[in-house]
Amino acid sequence: MLAVVAGLGVGAYLKWFHKAPAARACERLTSLCGELDASTCADLAKVANDKAVTCVRSADTCMEAMGCVMGSALEDFERGFRRGSE
């Protein structure tokens, strides 16, 4: 019985308190920019890396947070562009 209760407790912790970094970044964007549509959060999950998530979490304004996301995407684009042009 104790194992079942402990298992439920761990499951609840993981579901509600230990979210994926992109989900936490999306919550931060929502708090700064207002309600976002689902496609914006899905796009964020595709391009989010650790640097972008950390940047978004420390942003003070909506524009700063969006700059974090765009900077991350452009960094990946530039890396691919360089590889493609070699």
Image (spheres, helix red, strand yellow):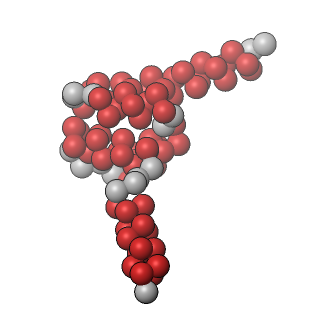
Query: Is 51 left, or right, of 24 in this rendering?
Result: right
Total marks placed: 0
The answer to whether residue 15 shows anywhere in this view is: no
Query: Going by the picture, which residue comes out furthest to the front?
Result: 2
Query: Going by the picture, which residue comes out furthest to the top?
Result: 86
Front residue of 9/35: it is 9
Which quadrant of the figure contains the N terminus?
Answer: bottom left
Front residue of 84/18: it is 18
Query: Going by the picture, which residue comes out furthest to the bottom?
Result: 1
* Residue 3 x, y percent position in the rendering: 46, 79
Q: Residue at the location (40% across, 53% down)? A: 19
Q: Residue at the location (23% across, 39% down)? A: 33
Q: Residue at the location (58% across, 25% down)? A: 76
Q: Is residue 76 above or below residue 5?
A: above
Query: Is 47 left, or right, of 27 in this rendering?
Result: right
Q: Is residue 44 above or below residue 1?
A: above
* Residue 47 x, y percent position in the rendering: 51, 37
**Quarter holding residue 86:** top right
* Residue 84 x, y percent position in the rendering: 74, 20
The answer to whether residue 78 shows anywhere in this view is: yes
**Quarter holding residue 15:** bottom left
Q: Is residue 24 above or below residue 12?
A: above
Front residue of 47/81: it is 47
